[in-house]
Image (cartoon, rainbow, N blue to C red):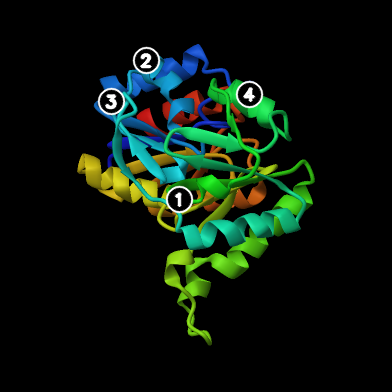
């Protein structure tokens, strides 16, 4: 087995519990990785400001892969690199989200924009990321330099249909096909659910599989020497790129099937158990 040199973890539902608690065992596991000479990094659909709270307790020195790799920042939030959506893609993506009766958010830089101050899941997201959104009447002034668009609804079937519709029309594979007239390749996107009620839309190279490759390049680590941990469908892409992958116990069967191993749930110290059993052991 190839020795592991980097552990890359999703945040919500993986590193932290459902109530966003970073447990003492999780912290101890990251400290144990450091003592073993194994680097640790996190990736999330969260904005950078929503990840900074983990820097001090975990002693993070690696880049934070925010927006599922749409924006890489140092622990002080200074920019390393980012991948933004084409303006030509943002408006039609928003239209698809609206056609499925989902609410929408936009992220640019470190800022979060919404149209309703207390719209679906806004309060919960604010509590999670620890900063408020900027309320705007519409997104007309926020179409440039967009890192992520989110569709939100508690109608989980509608969220799944919206994701499928975006993929069907804007995935790189579709854009690259010969069509008449030819499609603008700059409009390609990556879409996946980071939670059952969220569909995240980012640059096609802003996905967790690309995060594995990008962090490996930044840190001089081969992808086969990376272990990844996650719980949602958008984590499958990083499972596919890493040498070792671990699904959380509450993951769907599809996510579990894509992983090398399955640990306990995030409510049962799944992250710490995975580090102790599958990586340090």
- Which residue position is annotated with label 1? 144
The label nearer to you, 1 versus 2, is 1
Whether residues under marks 4 and 3 lie with C-beta atoms below 8 angstroms apart, the answer is no
Q: Which mark is residue 61?
A: 3
Q: CA distance from mark 1 to mark 2?
A: 32 Å
Which element carries disc 4, helix, strand or loop?
helix
Q: Earlier in the sequence, mark 3 or mark 2?
A: 2
Can residue 113 be seen here?
Answer: yes
Of residues 55 and 232, which is closer to you in this image? 55
Height in image: 140 above or below 54?
Answer: below
Q: CA distance from mark 4 to mark 3?
A: 27 Å
Can residue 221 be seen here?
Answer: no
**278 relative to 122 in the view: left or right:** left
Whether residues under marks 1 and 2 lie with C-beta atoms below 8 angstroms apart, the answer is no
Residue 79, located in which quarter of the rendered image?
top left
Which element carries disc 3, helix, strand or loop?
loop
Q: Position of residue 185 (x, y in %)?
A: 43, 71
Q: Position of residue 11 (x, y in %)?
A: 50, 31
Q: Residues within 10 Å of mark 4 (few under 14, many from 20)?
A: some
Of residues 228 and 152, which is closer to you in this image? 152
Q: Residues within 10 Å of mark 2 (few under 14, many from 20)?
A: few
The label nearer to you, 4 versus 2, is 2
The label nearer to you, 3 versus 1, is 1
Q: CA distance from mark 4 to mark 2?
A: 23 Å
Q: CA distance from mark 1 to mark 4?
A: 39 Å
Height in image: 193 above or below 47?
Answer: below
The label nearer to you, 1 versus 4, is 1
Q: Earlier in the sequence, mark 1 or mark 2?
A: 2
Q: Which mark is residue 56?
A: 2
């Amino acid at each position: 087995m190839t020795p592991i040199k980097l552990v890359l973890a999703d945040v919500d539902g993986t590193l932290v519990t459902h109530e966003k608690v970073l447990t003492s065992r999780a912290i101890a596991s990251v400290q144990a990785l450091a003592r073993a000479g194994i680097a640790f990094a996190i990736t999330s659909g969260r904005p950078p400001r929503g990840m900074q709270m983990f820097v001090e307790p975990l002693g993070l020195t690696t880049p934070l892969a925010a927006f599922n790799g749409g924006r890489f920042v140092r622990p002080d939030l200074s920019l390393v690199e980012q991948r933004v959506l084409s303006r030509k893609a943002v408006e039609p993506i928003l239209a698809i989200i609206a056609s499925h009766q989902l609410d929408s958010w936009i992220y640019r830089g470190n800022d979060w924009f919404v149209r309703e101050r207390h719209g679906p899941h806004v309060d919960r997201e604010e509590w999670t990321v620890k900063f408020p959104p900027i309320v705007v009447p519409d997104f007309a002034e926020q179409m440039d330099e967009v890192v992520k668009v989110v569709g939100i609804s508690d109608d989980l079937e509608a969220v799944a249909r919206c994701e499928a519709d975006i993929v069907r029309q804007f995935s790189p594979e579709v854009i690259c096909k010969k069509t008449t007239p030819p499609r603008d390749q700059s409009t390609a996107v990556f879409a996946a659910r980071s939670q059952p009620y969220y569909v995240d839309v980012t640059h096609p190279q802003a996905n967790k599989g690309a995060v594995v490759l990008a962090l490996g390049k930044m840190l001089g680590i081969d992808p086969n020497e990376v272990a990844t941990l996650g719980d949602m469908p958008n984590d499958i892409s990083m499972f596919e790129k890493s040498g070792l992958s671990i699904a959380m116990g509450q993951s769907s069967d599809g996510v579990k099937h894509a992983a090398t191993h399955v640990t306990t749930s995030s409510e049962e110290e799944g992250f710490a158990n995975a580090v102790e059993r599958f990586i340090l052991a």
